[in-house]
Image: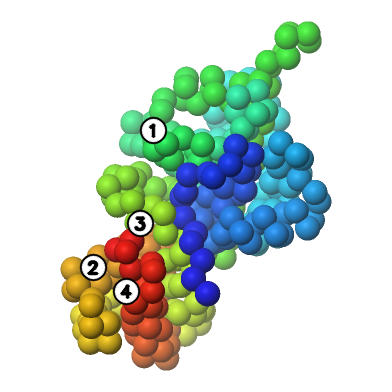
Amino acid sequence: MFVQIGFLKQGGHSSCGLHSISNALQLVGIPASIMELGRKVKSIEKADKDGINEKNIIRGIETFGGSAKAYTLDSDEKTKSVIDKALDQGKSIVICVWDYNHWAVLAGKTPRGKYIWIDSGEEEVMGIAPWAEISDWMIARNEEEETEEYFFITVGNTKVHSVVPSFYDRYLAIKRNTLLREYWGSYLKDLHEFFGSSRKQPSISGKVFFEKYGETIADAVYYYSDFGVMASINSILDNYKFIAESYGLTVPEKNIHAAIAQLSVRITKFMYDGTRRLF
């Protein structure tokens, strides 16, 4: 069954935690849908009635194979230093904002040192801001004790290439291409499944795969979907190729023919069922 996974706008006011887990995991190469997370996280420990607490955030990340480390720091300088180091290491960051009332994600940095944020509660979903704005967003003040603190969780994955260090290079393409943003994780999940593991096997890069076999796939889809428009088919293929290149995915040579067939079937279904209107 096709499941939508992407950088999405949240449907309810209390689902920012689930969206932030999904967004952070996608960045480090783990596609997890909101539906899957809702089942898994709430089965681990019941979520707070107004959302998901930090324990559920961490355990939700770990349940899907990510690594998570929580930080509570008492200064702007320390917080920036730890976050910068984590982003350089390819980790995404789940940040607690608005005085512990909301969750969002840091996805990377620009060449000029600004930060790319993803917030399911915002209409545009993602944007860029200087550290001063991020710090002000994150800071939680305790008026009685006259203290302030910053809480965040770093998210990693050693098994798959992370897109965090190079996310800025993809940012403008994502902003321009709504379908790429909204189905980012869906494409990634398909490619993980169709390509299979390349460990210790003769392989070709995802880039070479689509350059070499993309036309074959497009022709097959066009043939079997009599209403198919080649431009729409190619746009879907371009999105798959973009994801494959972003994560440095490879295809074992023994899986090439199966991957061609599976992608042809998947895209034909896109064009055939109700999802085709999206393309």
Position of 205 relative to 78 (above/below): below
Circle 3: is it few (<14), some (14-19), or many (20+) Cα within 10 Å? many
Circle 4: is it few (<14), some (14-19), or many (20+) Cα within 10 Å? many
Residue 109 picture location, percent across and down: 41, 38
**Badge 4 is on which residue?**
271
In the displayed structure, does residue 221 sit left or right of residue 23? Answer: left
Q: Which mark is residue 128?
A: 1
Question: Distance of mark 1 from mark 4, alpha carbons?
Answer: 34 Å
Q: Earlier in the sequence, mark 1 or mark 3?
A: 1
Residue type marked 2: Ser
Circle 2: is it few (<14), some (14-19), or many (20+) Cα within 10 Å? some
Q: Earlier in the sequence, mark 2 or mark 1?
A: 1
Helix, strand or loop status at disc 4 = helix
In the displayed structure, does residue 181 sit left or right of residue 221? Answer: right
- Labels 3, 2: front one: 2
Residue 32 picture location, percent across and down: 57, 60
Q: Are marks 1 and 3 in contact (CB under 8 Å)?
A: no
> Is there any visible trace of residue 208 in the rendered image?
no
Residue type marked 1: Ile
